[in-house]
């Protein structure tokens, strides 16, 4: 049986890093500079990626194991 705990831990760490970066961006946009059209496009890309990630994570629940 595969030990996948490490994979979950890596995913959680990566998500925490993304959350930190988003927080930093929020502070930048609130206190340092206004968003540009490029920022808006990058944010849209992040939102799309987050949606795809959510869909992929949800899809894991529907995978049925097939023994080799």
Image (cartoon, helix red, strand yellow):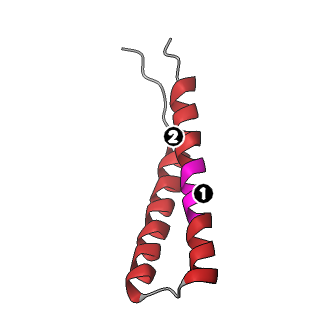
Residue placed under numbered mark 1 in the picture: 19
Rendered residue at 47%/74% (across/down)? 43
Residue farthest toward the front in the current orientation of the protein: 32
Q: Nearer the viewer, residue 65 or 35?
A: 35
Q: Position of residue 58 (x, y in %)?
A: 55, 48
Q: Is residue 45 above or below residue 13?
A: below
Could you say whether the residue bearing mark 1 is in a helix, strand or loop? helix
Quarter holding the C terminus is: top left
Q: Residues within 10 Å of mark 2 (few under 14, many from 20)?
A: few
Per the picture, the main secondary structure of the magenta-coloured stretch is: helix
Specify whether 37 is left or right of 50.
left
Could you say whether the residue bearing mark 2 is in a helix, strand or loop? helix
Specify whether 27 is left or right of 57.
right
Specify whether 62 is left or right of 36.
right
Residue 53 colored magenta?
no
Q: Position of residue 7 (x, y in %)?
A: 51, 30
Rendered residue at 49%/69% (across/down)? 47
Q: Nearer the viewer, residue 40 or 52?
A: 40
Quarter assignment of residue 66: top left
Residue placed under numbered mark 2 in the picture: 60
Residue 21 colored magenta?
yes
Q: Position of residue 61 (x, y in %)?
A: 56, 39
Q: Which residues are magenta?
A: 16-22
Q: Nearer the viewer, residue 41 or 25?
A: 25
Rendered residue at 53%/17% (across/down)? 3
Distance between mark 1 and mark 2 Cα atoms? 22 Å
Rendered residue at 57%/24% (across/down)? 5
Q: Nearer the viewer, residue 66 or 54?
A: 54
Sequence-wise, which precedes: disc 1 or disc 2? 1
């Amino acid at each position: 049986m595969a030990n996948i705990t490490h994979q979950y831990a890596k995913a959680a760490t990566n998500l925490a890093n993304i959350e930190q970066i988003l927080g930093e961006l929020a502070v930048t946009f609130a206190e340092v500079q206004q968003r540009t059209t490029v920022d808006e496009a990058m944010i849209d890309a992040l939102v799309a990626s987050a949606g795809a990630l959510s869909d992929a994570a949800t899809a894991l629940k529907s995978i049925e194991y097939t023994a080799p």
